[in-house]
Image (tube, helix red, strand yellow):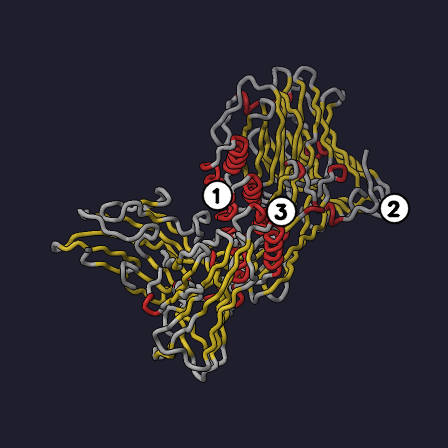
Amino acid sequence: MFDYNPNAKLEERDYARTATWTLRAPMLALSNPDPALAFPPGTKLLPQLLLRNTTAKPIDAALRFNWRAASSAGKAPGPALRLAPYETRRIDVAALQDAAILPKEANWTSVTITTNSKPDELTAVAASYDSTLRHGAQTPFSDQLTFRWEGGMWEYDPYHSSIITAGNGGTKPTQAAFTIFYNQGTQRYDLEQTLQPDEQMWIDIGKLIRERVPDKSGKALPADLTSGSYEFRDLTNTGVGTLFEGKVIYDKTYGHVAYGCAACCGYDVLNAVLRYDPLSLAVGSTAGQGVDVPDMCQGGAPADVSPSFYGNWSTGSIATVDYYGTHTGVSAGSTTSQTSGFLNNNDSLRRCPLSGTPATGGVNVVAIPVNFRQTSATDAGNGDLRFIYAWDSSTGRLSDLSNCVIGEYVTVQGNSTDPYPWPSPPYAAGAHSPNPTDATSNPPAPDLAATMGQFQDDHTLYTNVPVAWVTPYVQTGFTSIQSYEYKCTNYHNGNYVEIDGPLYIVREVFQSNGTWSYSVSKSNAVATISPLP
Amino acid sequence: MLTTSGLLRLVSTFSAVWVICPQTKPVAPGVDISYVLQNQPHSLHEPVVLTFKVSNGLPNAIVLDLGQNRENGFAFRLLRPDGTTVDSPSFTRNGISAIGTIVLRSGESLSQELLLNDRFQFNIPGKYQVVGHLAQEITDEKGNTLGSDPGFQKDLEIVPKDESSLRKVCQDLSDRLERSNSYDDAALIARELAIIDDPVAVPFLDKALRADRLIEPFITSALVRIGNEEAVQALIGALNGKTGAAAEAVRRGLTQIRSRISDPSLRELIDRALHEYQSQGS
């Protein structure tokens, strides 16, 4: 049974982007059957292909093979064909083996057909049975390539075993991951392999179990495992995958081989979104953008398919965007950016076809504080070390920072108690340092409007109780770690961005030459009270 | 605390009218300073806002020292209805603050709102009087003294709590917050709203907390101070909607409320919210 959709477009089914419709049969059993199938000794199969032109015009087709023997594998070109209107042609693959186009010792081959027809105008069947038609196998042709295949049950027991394969139908190498799920999906066994174009990874489940072959994390499958499910993933091409797959389960008692197909996975292409909407970035800075789309084989969890959208980005004049979607702010303002790409659509009945998918979102190029700098440091008296800091706006206009605040974050003695108690003596009983950024302190110590362009920072003695010096003096010191930070409602999700730090504020009471003194220092500046009263 | 008490002499007369007698020369003609007390009379718990204005009509620039965070350079004294007087406390603080030195070019003016509730408690109804001035003299850019701020004296009436009036004040502030287009404006409005120490303010604080205006510290602080069930619900709502430091501040606020309340159901409500927050790894 073949489906034919006269409206099918090549661009939907040209998964490998070769501008040619391509069909593959991944597991054609060759004349010399794989011993693993346990056919009766001496069984000789007659592999053959049937190709039919379903149209009223001639169709050209070319075949190629990727064969596999017990210890070797290779490629072989097949015949080039011109099929007359409505012609059905039989290709005797056994004869190709006899003619040494394919090695006689080869057990399996994949068959690839490239044609100038539109999708489904050429139909193809591959079969491989012995002369009694009692023993043999089939492998269907399909054009499907995708990023993930979810496979049903495989079997392995004294009477059954399974061989599973996945191949690279693309034009570049790809990294393929194969996972076996067992114990009701609670455990997994993972393999990975780099596949060259047309190359297949060949998974003999029975062999993995029998020989205790370790997976990539060193774990072997349980020796008594008899069934499970499986999955293939294309780790390189996430938007439009390049993997094709196949599976056979064979019965060692009667020599039956049953072919099984996995289900292709696709995306909910109508809900492709830009990862950051809006994307906020500062003038002169860069920010990456990506595309996420619900992966319907993962319950709709967002999947990163950004590479499928490379090279198609555009945006307004206040920003630029490169091939990879990296935006650079040019001037303050708002615009949109857009891109498009092809994705495997979540339509398994239509073979997860390629769907052209747009994605669009906002871009806010905003002003942020930049060039934060210390402009002065003075001993303001009474143990107050005062700094002046200044900054600019990334747009050159401080007034553009009206959505930004600037502040500090201070911890005393690392992550110690907050408020941090100052030791007494020498400080007054009850003296402590609150975290100045604690919004719940009363009154709160809020951030300052970034439009000011400068602020002062006083490192004073404690302020919660009147300053007093308690004798007998003892030598003591503690360090506060400070950073300056800003946040803007329209940048970095409104979260703080550190602009300077860490800075170390060191307060000490010490005795030198018989004189007790207090000092507070930071950034090579110091304020002192000496002598202490 | 008045650190420049020598510059300010308050004389109480039998009629309780205070007169300010600056000891230094008056400010030069052309420098116009005024103080405007808004919205008389005030209901108990309402914010009391004094607007300080100065304009420079001189041909050259003038320099004013408004003190740390542009607040600490004002000296105020309050006569309360019970006859006691209070000097405004010092605002000297550890940490960052706005630079108080302001240069006004010829023809420029400055308007700054001062929230008197930050300095005084207006916690009993009655007639108050407030006097004040800039503590430091006004100079030119070379540091030459031009004179001092003559200051002001204002009568202020606080009437008993009027819930509908308080709600109207909250609504006005909420509307202004929505219309404000800079952090400066939003922060001042948020401070006024946060000063209203009454459950009437909670729905408006809740709305303000959900606004994306960077004013969470003021609002969170007020909700923590009020600390009733409605305030707790508002904070829990914010805990689920905020990220980063804002969410962490809300978490600390809820923890503070929990530590001082005895209502078991409210404590359980907070515990659940905090547990959920922590389990989300927020």
For marks 2 and 1, give the CA distance.
78 Å
- Which marked residue is nearer to the observer: mark 1 or mark 3? 1
Q: Are marks 2 and 1 in contact (CB under 8 Å)?
A: no
- Residue A56 — which label? 2
Tag 1: residue type? Gly
First in sequence: mark 2 vs mark 3: 2
- Of all chains, the one bearing label 1 is B
For marks 1 and 3, give the CA distance.
36 Å
- Which marked residue is nearer to the observer: mark 2 or mark 1? 1
Q: Nearer the viewer, residue A446 or A487?
A: A446
On the image, the x and y values in percent for residue B198 come to 54, 47
Residue of label 3: A292
Please identify the quadrant where the C terminus of chain A is shown.
Answer: bottom left
Q: Nearer the viewer, residue A145 or A377?
A: A377
Answer above or below: position of A193 versus B187: above
SS of the residue under disc 3: strand
How many numbered marks are there?
3
Residue of label 1: B253
For marks 2 and 3, give the CA distance.
43 Å
Asked if labels 2 and 1 share a chain, the reply is: no
Answer above or below: position of B155 versus A172: below
- Of all chains, the one bearing label 3 is A
- Of all chains, the one bearing label 2 is A
